[in-house]
Amino acid sequence: MLKQKPAKAQDALIKNLREKTPKARKTKTGQSALARRFLRWRYILPAILVILVLVAVYGYFTYKTVLTHVNSGVDHIQAAVDQVKNDQVSFNVATLDSLTQQLSAAQSDFHQARDAAGPVSLVLPLVGWLPGPAYDLSQLPGFLEIAEKTSQSGVLVLQGARPALAPFDNSSQGSSGPAGATASGKLTQAAQALAQPAAQAKFNRAAGWA
């Protein structure tokens, strides 16, 4: 009589035969591919999350920096407007210089805001379709460009007009008009000052940026 193999030996033989079948090899291969895929995403997902966090942090600090410069520029513009609307302020060379300083500071703030936005300005126009304040954010690059150019145009106009105001300003030490000059003489001096190449160059630059 043949000796019966022990149960453990029979189980091992059956397991070995099953592993050698095509179905078993296919199942084992599928499990290995699934394991490799899981390990791959195990490292990719944390990397994606880290990138998203870094982008969010960068966007937040960029937003705060841009907002600070924009608010400062708007404050300078508002100060210039309030000075023009103030009836107690005499419109002389000193007032013109003060307005020029305010607009120049506003132009500098808007320029710094554009620089601070950096590559974010390229992405903002793409989010205009989103709900909420996304549309306003998508218009921010255009707003900053217009604000900067408008402020710079105002500076150029005031600088070009300054020599024409000097003959009418008794407090101006740089007045070229003689003491007791007639109104007609002052108007002639003002017209000559506005016709100077330096003044015309400033007006042309201002008109080109408007």
Image (tube, rainbow, N blue to C red):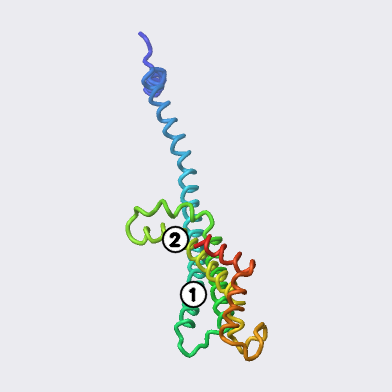
Q: Is residue 89 left or right of residue 188?
A: left
Q: Percent from the top left, x then y, of residue 93?
A: 59, 82
Q: Check disc 2 and give the amino acid type.
A: Leu
Per the image, the residue denoted by label 2 is 140
**Whether residue 84 is situated above or below residue 155 in the rendered picture:** below
For residue 182, what is the image quadrant? bottom right
Q: At x 51% / y 76%, what residue is drawn?
A: 76
| Residue 198, horizontal then vertical, whole percent | 64, 68
Instruction: Name the mark nearer the viewer: 2 or 1.
Output: 1
| Sequence-first tag of 2 and 1 | 1
Closest to the observer: 165 or 29? 165
CB atoms at circles 2 and 1 under 8 Å apart?
A: no
Q: Which residue is depicted at the point 44% across and 35% down? A: 35
Q: From where the camera sits, is residue 6 visible?
A: no
Q: Label for residue 3?
A: none
Residue picked out by circle 1:
77
Quadrant location of the N terminus in the rendered image: top left
